[in-house]
Image (spheres, rainbow, N blue to C red):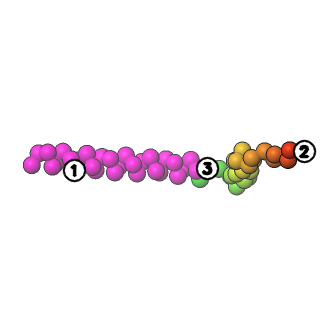
Amino acid sequence: MKLWKLLGLAGVVGVAATGAVVVRAERKRQAYTPDEIRDRLHARIAEAEPEPVEPAKS
């Protein structure tokens, strides 16, 4: 019976810790201004786009 109580307590602690991490990440995400978000998205798109490849001359 003690094992089940310990597992239950560990589960509750895990759920609480996960919630704290989610709340912290959400606060950090909401701290950006729309201009900062737009700039970051443009930078990510620029990184993701492959460089143009010139066709081989024959």
* Mark 2: few/some/many CA within 10 Å (<14, 14-19, 20+): few
The kind of residue tagged 3 is Ala
User: Element under label 2?
Assistant: loop
Tags 1 and 2 in contact by the CB under 8 Å rule? no
Q: Which of marks 1 and 2 is nearer the N terminus?
A: 1
Q: Main secondary structure of the magenta part?
A: helix
Relative to residue 30, is residue 17 drawn left or right? left
Part of the protein shown in magenta: 1-29
Residue linked to disc 2: 58
Residue linked to disc 1: 8
Whole-percent x, y for residue 28 in the image: 56, 47
* Mark 3: few/some/many CA within 10 Å (<14, 14-19, 20+): few
| Residue placed furthest toward the bottom | 34
Q: Earlier in the sequence, mark 1 or mark 3?
A: 1
| Residue placed furthest toward the right | 58
| Residue placed furthest toward the left | 1
Q: How far apart are marks 1 and 2 (CA)?
A: 71 Å
Whole-percent x, y for residue 30 in the image: 59, 53
Q: How far apart are marks 2 and 3 (CA)?
A: 54 Å
User: Element under label 1?
Assistant: helix
Residue occupying image coordinates x 28% and y 50%: 12
Residue occupying image coordinates x 74% and y 47%: 50
The kind of residue tagged 1 is Gly
| Residue depth check, mark 1 versus mark 2: number of the one nearer the observer | 2
| Mark drawn on residue 31 | 3
